[in-house]
Amino acid sequence: MKVPMLRGGFREEEVFNLPKDLIRVMLDELRKDGSDLSHVQEFYDSRGYTREFLLPKDLTLTLVTGYDVKRRHAINKRWMELESLTYV
């Protein structure tokens, strides 16, 4: 049986877990830096699989900007603009 391929070369069954896996990678990387992630909530279904994550706004933006090139670019442009301001 041929497994359907989707954009990015992922198989259909992989796409379902992709966001959860990316969230875990992001959280693991932040833990390595010593970030306090005690406010992150993970909920499981009756089989013990992750059903959902509840992320605060800062982590949600971190996750979304990882996907969205335009948003990352806008954030970087604004960051550079703020850095160029002269404070008296």
Image: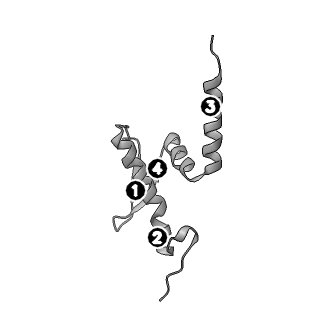
Query: SS of the residue at dot 3?
Result: helix
Residue lying at 64% horizontally and 24% vertically, measured from the top left: 84
The residue that disc 2 covers is 14
| Residue 43 disc label | 1
Check disc 4 and report the residue beneath it. Answer: 54
Q: Which mark is residue 80?
A: 3
Give the x, y percent position of residue 56. 49, 42
Of badges 3 and 1, nearer the viewer stands 3
Residue in the image at 49% along x and 74% along y: 11
Using the numbered discs, state the Cα–Cα distance from disc 1 to disc 4 in whole angstroms: 8 Å
Q: Which of marks 2 and 1 is nearer the N terminus?
A: 2
Tell which of 73 and 30 is nearer to you.
73
Residue 3 is situated, as x and y percent measured from the top left of the image, at 49, 82
* Colour mapping: one colour
Mark 1 lies on a secondary structure that is strand
Label 1, residues with CA under 10 Å away: few <14, some 14-19, many ≥20: few
Q: Earlier in the sequence, mark 4 or mark 2?
A: 2
Q: Give amino acid for label 3.
A: Met
Image quadrant holding the C terminus, namely top right
Give the residue drawn at x 63%, y 27%: 82
Mark 3 surroundings: few (<14), some (14-19) or many (≥20) residues within 10 A: few
What's the amino acid at mark 4? Leu
Q: Nearer the viewer, mark 4 or mark 2?
A: 2
The kind of residue on which mark 1 rests is: Phe
Mark 2 Cα-neighbour bin, 10 Å: few <14, some 14–19, many ≥20: few
Q: Distance between the residues labelled 4 and 2?
A: 21 Å
Of the two numbered discs 3 and 4 in the rendering, the one whose residue sits closer to the viewer: 3
Residue at the location (51% across, 49% down)? 63
Q: How far apart are marks 2 and 3 (CA)?
A: 37 Å
